[in-house]
Image (cartoon, rainbow, N blue to C red):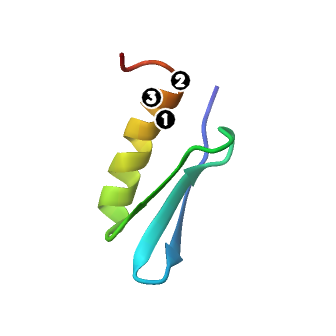
Amino acid sequence: MPLTFKLEPDGDQWHAFCVELTGCHTFSKTKADALKHLKNAVFLYKGIIK
């Protein structure tokens, strides 16, 4: 199933979230870090990383 990642500015940080996974959100100072953290969060959310 394809997943949609969204990145939005939030003050001096970036808010990253996955539309299809309720509650799967992260924040970071840079877009690149926010995306990296979101990828890790998705793996954890889906139980891929143990």
Residue bearing mark 2: 46
Kindly give the residue lying farthest to the bottom in the view shown. Answer: 11
Question: Which quarter of the image is occupied by the C terminus?
Answer: top left
**Residue at horizontal 31%, vertical 60%?**
32
Q: Which amino acid type corresponds to the residue marked 3 in the rendered image?
A: Leu
- Residue contact between numbered discs 1 and 2, judged by CB atoms under 8 Å: yes
Q: CA distance from mark 3 to mark 1?
A: 5 Å
User: Vertically, is 17 above or below 15?
Assistant: above
- Residue contact between numbered discs 3 and 1, judged by CB atoms under 8 Å: yes
**Residue at horizontal 44%, vertical 46%?**
38
- Residue contact between numbered discs 2 and 3, judged by CB atoms under 8 Å: yes
Q: Position of residue 20 (x, y in %)?
A: 69, 40
Residue bearing mark 1: 42
Q: Residues within 10 Å of mark 2 (few under 14, many from 20)?
A: few
Q: Which amino acid type corresponds to the residue marked 1 in the rendered image?
A: Val
Residue bearing mark 3: 44
